Image (cartoon, grey):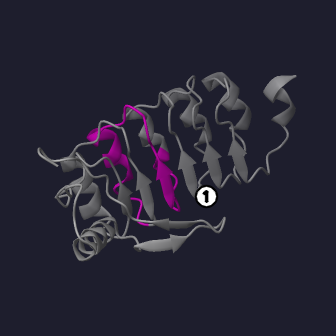
Amino acid sequence: MGLACFKKCKDLAALNLGRTKVSDDGLATFKNCTNLRELHLTGAMNVTDAGLAHFALSKDMLIVDLSDTNVTDKGLAALKPYTRLENLILARTAIGDAGLAHVHGHRNLKMALLVQTKVTAKGIGALHEALPNCKIIADHKAAPNPPPYVPVRWDEKEAKRIQQEWATKLKAPVEEKSKLGIMMMVSQAARSLPGQ
C-alpha cells in the first residue's frame, strides 16, 4: 500500500519520513497537506529539490529538517512561502552560501543548524546580518570570528570565561534544561598543544 494510504490525510500537522527510502515522487502524496507545520526528512537520501517543491502549499511550516538529504542550494528556494519558519536544519547537506541566501527574508527564523555543510564564514555572516536574532549553529571553521581553541590544561576561571564566550557567540545560555529534562551546557572541544 505504501504512501498511497496518506492521500486523503490533508490535515496532517507534522510529517516525519526520516531514515526512510521515500522518493521525490513519494512526497507528491503530501502536496495538498496545507496544514503541515513540521517536515522531518532526516536521512531520506532519495529526496532532492524536486521533492521539497511538493510542499509549496504548506505555507505555515515552522520546522524543516533536511539533514542528510540531497537537497541543493537551488532547492532551498522552495522555502520562500514559509514566512513563519522558525527552525531550519540542514546538517550534512551540500547547501552553501547561495542556498542560505534564500532564507534571508525569513524574519521569524530562530535557529539554523548548518553543521557539515558547504556554508562559509561569509555566508554565515550574511545570514547573521539579515537575521540578527537567529541562533546559527555551524562548524567551528565556518563560524564568524570564533573564540580561540582552548589548550587542554586551564584553570577553572579560564574555562568558565571561555565557556561564557562561546555561549555569547552562540546566543545560548551556558546551561539549559531540555524538554526531556536533560541538562545541557556549552562546551568547546579542546585540542592538545605541543608539549602538553
Can you identify the residue that label 1 sits on? Answer: 60
Which residue sits furthest bottom?
Answer: 157
From this view, report whether residue 50 is shown above or below residue 164: above
- In x, y percent, where is residue 78? 48, 41
Amino acid type assigned to the residue bearing label 1 in the image: Asp
Figure disc tally:
1
Between 96 and 49, the residue placed more toward the observer is 96
From this view, report whether residue 71 is shown above or below residue 21: below
In the visual, does 177 lie left or right of 4?
A: left
Q: Residue at x 72, y 42 (%)?
A: 32
The magenta-colored residue range is: 79-107
- In x, y percent, where is residue 124? 26, 52
Q: Residue at x 71, y 51 (%)?
A: 14
Q: Residue at x 60, y 38 (%)?
A: 41
* Res. 51 image quadrant: top right
Between 192 and 65, the residue placed more toward the observer is 192
